Structures are given as structure tokens and as C-alpha cells.
Amino acid sequence: MLIYVLVACDRLDEKQEKKLKQNLPELQAALQAYVDANEANDVTLINECASDDVEDWQLGITQPVKKNIHLNFPVNLFNSLARKYDIDCEVGYIEEDTREPVSYFGKQEGPGEAFLIAEYLGL
């Protein structure tokens, strides 16, 4: 199963958008470091942040997973980013080039739990 985890860039107020714009280089660097460290696992970076409208941004990763334990690393990464940068995250699966969200977690939603997300994904 191919999963994705994105920084939630929609439905942000003005203050949250400003903070996300300020933290964008650090978020991109952290995600790129994760992708580089997990290149053998076919982890790819989603980095579509060229628009002036933050709501159009897509920032995160895709990663193939076969077992629920494979979710621990990306969920832990995004939990740490959520704590550090006050963001929320969206996780879901990709089927036929379409993203289907299954859960949200982070600053407002509370920490993500890999076991529960695995249940939502049907792993």
C-alpha cells in the first residue's frame, strides 16, 4: 500500500499561514533528510509549494508500507514536526493516483498513533 503524509495547509487562519511560510525551509529540509535516509524504501518527497496561496501547497511524503510497524517512522517524524512547528498533518493512501485521507493529527488534532492509523488504512 502506498501511503502519504502531508502537512495540512488548508483551513489555516492568517497567523498559521504566516508561521507556515516562515517555517517552510526548515520543514522542507527535515522532510528531504527523511527521504534521503529512506531512499532504499522508495520514500518520495511531495514538495509543491510554489503557489502564493498556502491552501494550494502540498508538502509531505509518500511511502510504501506492508505492515503497521512501517508507519512508526513517518508518524513519529510528523508528530515531532507538529510539536516543533505547530502544524497538523493528513495521512491517507494513494490508489490510482488519487489521495484518500483517513486521519488527521498534530497540534490541533492531537498526536498521531501509528497503530490506529494502520487500522484506518486496513493494514
Image (cartoon, grey):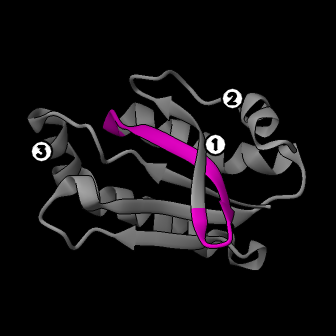
Q: Quadrant of residue 121?
A: top right
Residue stretch in magenta: 85-98
Magenta segment's dominant SS is: strand
For mark 1, what is the residue? 75
Q: Which residue is mark 2?
A: 113
Element on which disc 1 rests: helix
- Binning the other alpha carbons within 10 Å of mark 2 as few (below 14), some (14 to 19) or many (20 upward) gives some
Sort mark 1 into few (<14), some (14-19) or many (20+) by Cα contacts within 10 Å.
Answer: many
Checking the image for residue 17, the label placed there is none
The residue singled out by tag 3 in the image is 18
Give percent across and percent down for residue 49: 27, 68
Residues at circles 1 and 2 in contact by the CB criterion of under 8 Å: yes
CA gap between label 3 and label 2 equals 28 Å
Residue at 40% over, 26% down = 107
Q: Residue at 63% across / 42% down in the picture?
A: 75
Of mark 3 and mark 2, the one earlier in the sequence is: 3
Mark 2: amino acid: Glu
Badge 3 amino acid: Lys
**Where residue 16 appears, x then y in whole percent?**
19, 36
In space, the residues marked 1 and 3 are separated at their CA atoms by 25 Å
Q: Amino acid at mark 1?
A: Val
First reached walking from the N terminus: tag 1 or tag 3: 3
Check if residue 56 falls in the magenta segment.
no
The x and y percentages for residue 120 are 75, 35
- For the residue pair 86 and 98, the one nearer the viewer reads as 98
| Local secondary structure at mark 2 | loop
Q: Please determine whether, in this image, residue 109 is positioned above or below residue 54.
A: above
Q: Compare marks 1 and 2 and give the one earlier in the sequence.
A: 1
Q: Residue at x 38, y 62 (%)?
A: 58
Task: For the residues labelled 1 and 3, say whether their Cβ atoms are less than 8 Å apart.
Answer: no
What secondary structure is found at the residue carrying circle 3? Answer: helix
Q: CA distance from mark 1 to mark 2?
A: 7 Å
